[in-house]
Amino acid sequence: MAEVFRLEFEVGAAAPVSLVAGAVADLGAITQGAHELAVHVSEAEADLDMMNFLREGGVRGLVQEARRRELPGIFGREERDLELLEQELEEWLFFPPRSRRSQALVLSLLSPGRGYLPWTRLVDQLRASEVSRHLPDQPYRYRSLKYGNPFDAEILAASGAAATGLAFLLTVIRDWGSRRRRGNAAAADAEDQAWARAQMRRLVLDRIARGELPVGPEMVASLLSDDFVDAADRLSRRELEVMRLPEAEDSDS
């Protein structure tokens, strides 16, 4: 399944070819940012899946899941080492009552790339498999493009993390447009870009703080590149309207 996002914005009558091409390029920059967000969302979902595997089956449950997916390296001596580690974890968890000491050990062992080598190898491989499972091969495609006034585009977004990332960014850009028109109409171009980045950062962080997207604030800096900010700003000036249509059958997925 795929979700459909319909976008409309003003380009003016008899617009130059370069202007229309630039608008399409701006949409490309936005979907690139949405894909980056989708990766972060997928990582968060993978971490939650890993915790669920651990709660339900312990280390043995993780090993069994790795075997089911035929991930390499989770056999022989490494598997025996992991079983010994599970015994040690069970002893730690007997500290009363669910002590911070035992919780700290579990959290440190869940951190990829750290701690006990067989464990981290298992976690890294299984986490990578989970992230890949949440990410589609083709996250965004056009269903239709129509030049007129307004310009009309329909984008197919793969259901899940890809649709979540695109919906989040389109809402930010739409809301940003009205704030921009109220706050900085007379700013010079050089000041305008810095102001736009600062205001967009605040909008994104506020929405993350409200729980609208399961990602950490550290991803904001990489998202707000010059290309993204410029594209978002241009689209917001054109009074972008966003409609989220019912899901559509996706014959290519």
Image (tube, rainbow, N blue to C red):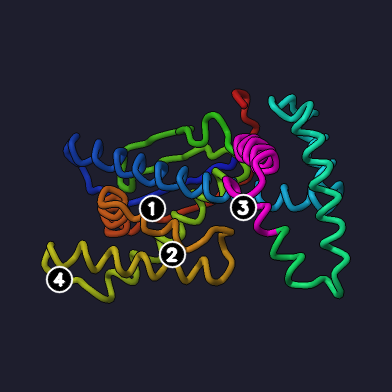
Q: Start and end of the magenta stretch? A: 107-133
Give the SS element for disc 1. Answer: helix
Label 3, label 1: how many angstroms apart (C-alpha)? 24 Å
Q: In the image, is 229 to the left or to the right of 37? A: left
Number of the front mark, 4 or 3: 3
* Amino acid type for the residue under numbered disc 1: Leu
Evaluate if marks 2 and 1 touch, with contact meaning CB atoms under 8 Å apart: yes
Q: Mark 2 or mark 4, which is nearer to you?
A: 2
The amino acid marked with disc number 2 is Val
The quarter of the picture where residue 117 lies is top right
Q: Is residue 5 left or right of residue 56?
A: left
Q: Nearer the viewer, mark 3 or mark 1?
A: 3
**Disc 1 crowd, CA 10 A, few/some/many (<14, 14-19, 20+):** some
Q: Residue shown at 29%/39% (left/top)?
A: 25
Q: Which residue is mark 2?
A: 204
Q: Secondary structure beneath disc 3?
A: loop
Disc 1 marks which residue? 223
Q: Which mark is residue 197?
A: none
Mark 3 and mark 2 lie on one chain; the one further toward the N terminus is 3
Question: Mark 4: which secondary structure?
Answer: loop
Residue 210 painted magenta:
no
Q: Position of residue 44 (x, y in %)?
A: 61, 52
First along the sequence among labels 2 and 1: 2
Circle on res. 111: 3
The quadrant of the picture occupied by the N terminus is: top right
Whether 122 is among the magenta residues is yes
Is there CB contact under 8 Å for labels 3 and 2? no
Task: Calculate the distance from the C-alpha at mark 2 to the C-alpha at mark 4.
Answer: 22 Å
> Which of the 4 image quadrants contains residue 186?
bottom left
Could you tell me which residue is drawn at 18 percent across and 65 percent down?
Answer: 192
Task: Using the image as rendered, state which of residue 109 and residue 217 is in the foreground.
Answer: 109
Q: Quickly name the residue at label 4.
A: 187
